[in-house]
Image: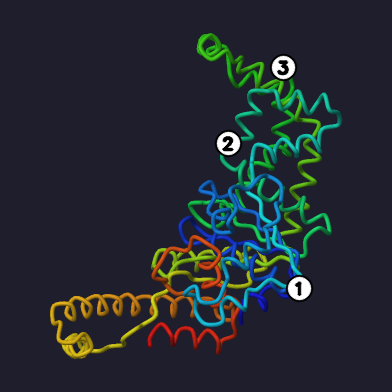
């Protein structure tokens, strides 16, 4: 099993996982590889570090898809650059197109208001409101909400064959799914209608006792909190049905057979624990869970060779340099211990996943920062089982 097989017949690939496990890099590799197979692909990232743009050789990304220059692929994938054999040729672009964008949550929220508001004047009034400005850029869940909104918007057109979403950095993998529902639930709920009435619950909740505090805040910040909240809710209230419709459409999109959830994890115990929990959560929600990609896996390079035998063999290979042989042997023994640990963690994950496919990408000797680095990962995600085995053999040779 490989990525093309996992994504056969899919229009959306959601790469989920906690921060620091290689989601952005993996998303870029998937986009690059699928475009090389003739598809029009757009990779959507919410990565503030802009690693996707760097990996693809772009100075920057914007809130709208930007095409990646095919010549850039060829420059980074020239044979003889130190990549594993065959990798460059495997990713040589065909008739496909690769596009990429970095989500701007504030701009996406503004665009959503423009689309939902009944008039241009209503949209302008909402965007000028102080409460809205905080909601659209700082409130928990707004980034995730805008991510799925942009995904939904792009999915409605025939512009791309495949959308690859690099989900926002999160404490856990399902914040991406739950936060938008919480925010949309508020915008679509009856509580909003009650709060929106000028003499309703919103004003009464603040109470008379809050008046001195609010007055002080107004003098310091220039904001009239009661007025801003009341105005904001009054403007947004009539649009609740639109937000509710969007939320239901997004949920249907994520449950569609055309969507694939891929969990990106590392081989460490904590990440494997989260992968197990994630699998169980997707099953409960009946979402299309297609596979797991485990990055930075330590393949066993030496096996259970006694340290003394390893030192002796290395001393002979290094022309009698005993000190260097000892240091290298200790390093290889430590790497072997990591490989044993990773093997155990992957076995635990395989036992829990059952039939769900699992792909392991090795720990490389250098950080992945450019297209040639993406090509190295590509070989493990897009190659056949036999090809992956041959590559692993080159690591242990």
Which of marks 1 and 3 precedes in the sequence? 1
> Which of disc 3 and disc 2 is earlier in sequence?
2
Marks 2, 1: nearer the viewer: 1
Instruction: Give the residue at mark 1.
Output: 9
Looking at the rendered structure, the secondary structure element under dot 3 is loop
The quarter in which the N terminus is drawn is bottom right
- Mark 3 burial class by Cα count in 10 Å: few <14, some 14-19, many 20+: few
Q: Disc 1 on helix, strand or loop?
A: loop
Residue 157: % across, % down? 83, 55
Marks 3 and 1, how far apart at CA: 53 Å
At 71% from the left and 27% from the top, the residue drawn is: 127
Q: What residue is disc 2 on? A: 139
Q: Between marks 2 and 1, how big is the CA–CA gap?
A: 36 Å
Q: Provide the residue designation for mark 3.
A: 199
Q: Nearer the viewer, residue 206 or 369?
A: 369
In this rendering, the answer to whether 310 lies above or below 68 is below
Taking the image as shown, residue 169 lies to the left or right of residue 315, namely: right
Where does the C terminus fall, quadrant-wise? bottom left
Secondary structure, mark 2, is loop
């Amino acid at each position: 099993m490989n990525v093309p097989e996992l994504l056969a017949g899919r229009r959306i690939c959601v790469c989920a996982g906690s921060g620091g496990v290689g989601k952005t890099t993996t998303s870029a590799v998937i986009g690059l590889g699928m475009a090389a197979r003739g598809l029009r692909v757009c990779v959507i990232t919410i990565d503030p570090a802009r690693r996707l743009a760097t990996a693809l050789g772009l100075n920057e990304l914007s809130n709208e898809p930007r095409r990646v220059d095919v010549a850039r692929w060829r420059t980074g994938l020239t044979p003889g650059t130190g990549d594993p054999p065959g990798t460059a040729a495997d990713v040589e672009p065909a008739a496909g197109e690769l596009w990429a964008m970095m989500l701007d949550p504030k701009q996406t929220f503004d665009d959503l208001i423009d689309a939902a508001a009944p008039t241009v004047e209503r949209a302008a009034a909402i965007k000028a409101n102080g409460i809205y400005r905080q909601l659209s850029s700082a409130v928990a869940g707004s980034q995730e909400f805008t991510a799925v909104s942009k995904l939904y918007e792009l999915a409605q057109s025939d512009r791309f064959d495949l959308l690859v979403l690099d989900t926002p950095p999160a404490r856990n993998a399902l914040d991406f799914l739950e936060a938008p529902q919480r925010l949309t639930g508020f915008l679509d709920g009856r509580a909003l209608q009650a709060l929106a009435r000028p003499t309703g619950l919103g004003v009464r909740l603040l109470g008379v006792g809050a008046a001195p505090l609010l007055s002080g805040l107004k003098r310091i910040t220039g904001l009239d909190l009661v007025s801003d909240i009341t105005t904001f809710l009054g403007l947004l209230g009539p649009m609740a049905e639109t937000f509710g419709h969007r939320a239901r459409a997004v949920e249907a999109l994520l449950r569609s057979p055309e969507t694939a959830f891929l969990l990106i994890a590392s081989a460490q115990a904590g990440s494997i624990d989260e992968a197990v929990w994630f699998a169980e959560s997707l099953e409960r929600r009946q979402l299309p869970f297609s596979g797991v990609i485990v990055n930075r896996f330590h393949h066993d390079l030496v096996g259970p060779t006694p340290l003394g035998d390893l030192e002796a063999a290395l001393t002979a290979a290094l022309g009698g340099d005993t000190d260097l042989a000892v240091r290298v042997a200790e390093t290889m023994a430590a790497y072997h211990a990591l490989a044993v640990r990773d093997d155990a963690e992957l076995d635990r994950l395989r036992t829990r996943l059952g039939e769900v496919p699992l792909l392991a990408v090795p720990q490389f000797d250098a950080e992945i920062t450019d297209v040639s680095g993406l090509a190295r990962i590509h070989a493990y995600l897009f190659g056949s089982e036999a090809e992956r085995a041959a590559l692993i053999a080159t690591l242990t040779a």
